[in-house]
Amino acid sequence: MARVVRAWKQCADLDCVRTSAALSRLPEAERKAWQNLWGQVKTLASGDSVGGLEQARHNLERKRWADAAEIYLRFPNATSPLRGCCRAWASQSRQRKASSKD
């Protein structure tokens, strides 16, 4: 299951209902439904540590730093020289999101 939903996160055909820009154009009820689905996908996709780490590497290759950092932080026992950088990146990303909402 984790492998299937990870594929959904990368499928370009689903960009129209996955990206922030696309979701912002949808009616509120539909947007919330899709956001809920993608939240569930994120949870299911992280259920497999090997696949999750593969997804993190995939994000790094595509310079999707915040996405990679979020995944690496879900696996505290994983060894990676990037873990410290991921913690710092995630912290800064959360701070930027919080300040942009104000």
Image (tube, rainbow, N blue to C red):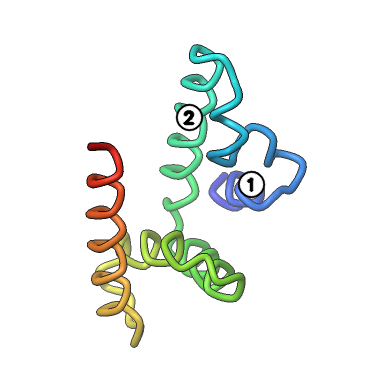
Q: CA distance from mark 1 to mark 2?
A: 18 Å
Q: Nearer the viewer, residue 10 or 51?
A: 10
Which one is earlier in the sequence, the residue at label 1 or at label 2? 1
Q: Pinpoint residue 42: horizontal percent, then vertical percent.
A: 46, 44
The quarter of the image holding the N terminus is: top right
Q: Which mark is residue 53?
A: none
Q: Which residue is mark 1?
A: 4
Name, please, the residue furthest toward the right: 13
Q: Please tell me whether residue 23 is drawn above or below residue 92 in the rendered image.
A: above
Q: Nearer the viewer, residue 90 or 57?
A: 90
Q: Pinpoint residue 78: horizontal percent, then vertical percent.
A: 33, 75
Q: Given the image, on which type of amino acid does mark 1 rest?
A: Val
Q: Pinpoint residue 7: horizontal percent, then vertical percent.
A: 66, 51
**Residue beneath the point at 55% across and 67% down:** 59
The tally of labels here is: 2
Q: Which mark is residue 35?
A: 2
- Tell me the element at label 1: helix
- Tell me the element at label 2: helix
**Residue beneath the point at 69% across and 35% down:** 16
The quarter of the image holding the C terminus is: top left
**Residue beneath the point at 71% across and 48% down:** 11
Q: Given the image, on which type of amino acid does mark 2 rest?
A: Gln
Q: Relative to 43, is 17 on the left or the right?
A: right
